Each structure stands twice: as structure tokens, then as C-alpha cells.
Amino acid sequence: MVQTTFAKEASPVYSLHYVKEDQSNDYSKATGNNRTKLLKRIPLDRLMDLKVDYAFKQLFGNEKNKDITVVFLNAILQTTGRNRIKDISFTNTEAGGEYVDDKQSRLDLLVVTDEDERIDVEIQFTNKYDMIKRSIYYWAGTYRRLLGKKMPYKQLRPVIAINILNFSLFDQTERFHTTYHLYEDEERFKLTNVMEFHFIEMSKLIKDWKDDKLDPWNNVLARWLLMLGMVDHRNDKIYDDIYRELEEISMKDESLRDAFKNWEELSMTEEEYLAYESRLKRIMDEEAFKRENELIRQEAAEMRKEAERMTTEAKQTMKKAKQQINEAEQKTKESEQKIKESEQKTKESEQKIKESEQKAKESEQKAKESEQKAKESEQKAKEDIARQLLARGMKLEDVVESTGLAMDKILKVKSDDSAKQ
């Protein structure tokens, strides 16, 4: 396919020329000894990691490599049916309040298609927080800047945000490339064509490659993204199998072959490689610092959670102890009441016992008195019998034996009777 683009001359004006872009979707693997050698002077591990923002911008954000940038972006835009790119220029814009690191990690492209669309490209090496909100924020800045003073809103042109992420972002899908627009909730028709977001998750792409789910021979986007994922300095991994596959494909894909050539030259330039290593070290240090902070936050969260758990347990223990104390106090009160009732009953029992003892003493006294009276009555009756027996002339010894009285008592009875006579 022949694509229209512009080459920069001495002045800021671009002149029109044509770039041949291979868009074949029916590649077949190379056979025989026709295989070319992509890298001629450098080993794979010496290549810059293109997922590092500095390396990506030096290769795809360079005016001399505009043609391969056009091919790369067209591969992405094909997925949503956008018109092909006809012109591209590199801008150095920034959103209000943007940090230095944010500017370094973003590549701003002014891309012109047949529909006069604008594309904003951002590559992110480390996992920045709130990635979705950040992407919308940068999109809004680019969209807003397109409207000059006294320009009508109808002159606002579409802006497309492309985010290339070296980390997983969406748990809802296993697809490495997802796109987003504004749609009506129920009938799902598109509200506008001015907003479009692309998220490319490189970790999912590599997983698909390992699972043999990619066909870079017939998928232009897959082959370009595999080139980005081939060297992974952050995780100290080099994918030789990806290189061998792309090396064969490059026999038919001239743009891919040119990209490898420029990539190799960039990686061999000592000044560029030193700048790349400096940026990579800074990114790695920042990532290590963030991981350490994240671990500290996790430990702090775990400690807070443990403290909350212990506090909850303590509260529950205190509540249980308070309940037990209340129950104990209630039982104590009940026991004290029972003790009081028991003491009262004891007092009443003691009083009854005293009264019973008193009655017993009185009864005993009466019994003694009765016994004494009975003895006296018995004595009197015996004396009366003795008196009668003596009156009949019975001998004293026989009277003693008959009455059981002592001899002196018998004599006294006899004496008393004689005195009465």
C-alpha cells in the first residue's frame, strides 16, 4: 500500500511525498536460506528496552523515523476503523500542573488523518497510580488546546489517546489491547467520535505469545508490539524466540526491518545509551522506592488491621468481662438477699429454739414438780397403808415389807398416830 506523508525540509513547512507501507495480512513463514540477519553489530541484550520512555521517544518520536511511527500508529488505529494517517509531526506540549516525570514519559504527536483527527500517544514504564484518570486528564488538555480564541466549538477535532503500559491494568479482560468510547447506556450507539482511548498492556501480550495465541505474520499490530516486548531490562529478560520470529517476518516487512536498523543504531550510540541507562536507573530506583513504600504501606495497613482486630477483641473481652461482672454483681446481690433471708430465718429459728428451750425448761420444771407431788402422794399413800396395817396389829417388819417404807418411817407413822391418840 502507498501512504501519503510529509517530510520536513529546512523550513517548518512539510513537503508531500509517499511512503510505502507493507499492509499484507497474508504472510507466510520464510523458508530456505533466504533468511536475513536483522542485527549485524550488536547482541540482543545490548538493545535498549523500548518500553523505557526515553528509548521509545528516541525511536518513535524522532523526525527521521517518522515513517515507522506512521506504520506503528496505523496498526493500532486499524482496530477501530479510523482513517489511515496521512501526516505526523512531533509536538512538545504539556498539561497544566504536569510533573517533569510525566513529561518524560509522554510522547505528544500531532497526527493528521483524512478526517483531521489528532492522536496523543503516551508510553508508561512504571505503574503510575490513577492511570485511567491521568489518561483522561491529558486527553482533555490536548482537546482543549485545539480550540483557539474566538474559534467555534465545531472546529474542535477528535483526539485519540494511546497508552502503552508495561503492567496489567484491567482485571476484567485478558485482551492486551482494549479501546473505549462514549456510548448510550441502553442502545449502545456512540455519542461522539472525538474521544477514543487505547490501552495496550504489554504483560498480557507476552502471556499470549507464550500461550501461542499470537500470529505476528498476519497481525501487523502484534509484530510491532512484540518488538516492544522483546527486550525487558526491568525484569532482566530477553526473548530470543520473538527476535527469531520477527527476523523472518522482516524479510517481507520493510518497515519492521528499518525499525530494527534504527533501533540498533540508536542502541550503539554511546551518548544515547548512557542517557538511556541513566533514565532506566532512575526508573528502577523510583520503582524500587515505590515498591518499598508500598510494602511499608501494606505493613502499616496490616498493623492497623491487627491493631483494629486486637482492639475489637479487647472491646469484646471487656464487654464480656463487664457482662460477667454484671452477672456476678447480680448473683452477689441475689446471694446477699438470700443470706439476709437466711439470717432472718436463722434468727427466727434461734428465737423459736429459745422459746422451745424455755418451754422445755418449764415443762421439765412442771415434770419435776409433778414427780415430786407424785412421790409425796405415793409416800402419803404408803404411810396411810402402813398406818392401817399397824392399826390392825401387823408387826413392824411385815409393814416394812408390805409398804416398802423404811423402818424409821414406819416408826414415825406409829409415833405420830400414838401422839394423836
Image (spheres, rainbow, N blue to C red):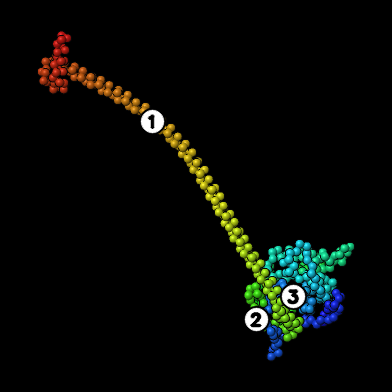
Q: CA distance from mark 2 to mark 3?
A: 23 Å
* Rendering coords of residue 321 (x, y %): 52, 47
Please name the residue that numbered disc 3 is placed on.
Answer: 58
Which residue is at a point 73% across and 86% down the rendered structure image?
Answer: 251
Write down the residue under mark 2. 240
Question: As shown in the figure, which amino acid type bears the numbered disc 2?
Answer: Asp
Residue at image position (16%, 21%) is 405
**First in residue order: circle 3 vs circle 1:** 3
Towards the viewer: 10 or 220: 10
Q: Nearer the viewer, residue 53 or 403?
A: 53
Amino acid type at circle 3 is Gln
Residue 136 rendering spot, x and y as whole percentages: 76, 64
Q: Quadrant of residue 351?
A: top left
Q: Amino acid at mark 1?
A: Glu
Report the residue at 15% width, 15% height from top. Answer: 412
The span from disc 1 to disc 2 (Cα, nearest Å) is 107 Å
